[in-house]
Amino acid sequence: MGEIVNKIQKSKLKTIDLEEFYPKNIVSIDIKQWLYEGIILKEKDFRLFLTEFDWSIYDNCLINLHCSEDVIIPSWAYMLVSVYLKNARKVIVGDKSALVELAYYDSINDLDLQQYTDLPVIVKGCSSKDIPDSVYLYLVDKLIPFARKIMYGEACSSVPLFSKK
């Protein structure tokens, strides 16, 4: 019997595993903790807390600001908190999933996609992380000008998505 040859390993097929780009250092900050009696944002007290807090613990973090109470938070309040978070990597108003999505977009934009020029590319399917579907769409859109062929799944069982004519 002959030698077993791994044809996938010898092929020019490139794999992109989005799980490798899953953002780290994500922190949620709930404005609720600074509300007077849980319902009112008092500007003077709010500003005092912000000036006395050690914001350096959030340096180089991805931050999503939100309020878990059903109250109206003025836009300036989020803007003011972001001033104190100037050393964070990214600050948004919204939930964690929105932050994860934006962080993925940044990672994809930082990829050197020319390395996939005229090559077959497979976007790995199975992941232990919760990767938003929109991130897969964004990646495929960015790959189309470069890749010869784009597939989804695993090398042994992939779904073809795109092929240059």
Image (cartoon, rainbow, N blue to C red):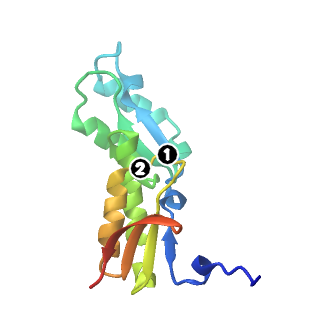
Q: Residue at x 43, y 35 (%)?
A: 29
Question: At 37% across and 38% down in the image, what residue appears?
Answer: 65
Q: Nearer the viewer, residue 155 or 146?
A: 155
Q: Is residue 123 visible?
A: yes
Q: Which residue is mark 1?
A: 26
* Residue that numbered label 2 is attached to: 100
Q: Quadrant of residue 31?
A: top left
Left/right placement of residue 33 relative to residue 134 reads: right
x and y percentages locating residue 78 in the rendered image: 31, 39
Q: Quadrant of residue 45?
A: top left
Q: Residues within 10 Å of mark 2 (few under 14, many from 20)?
A: many
Instruction: Say which quadrant the N terminus sits in.
Output: bottom right
Q: Please, what is the three-letter code of the amino acid marked with disc 2? A: Val
Question: Real-space Cα distance between discs 2 and 1?
Answer: 8 Å
Label 2 close to label 1 by CB (< 8 Å): yes
The mark that comes first in sequence, 2 or 1, is: 1
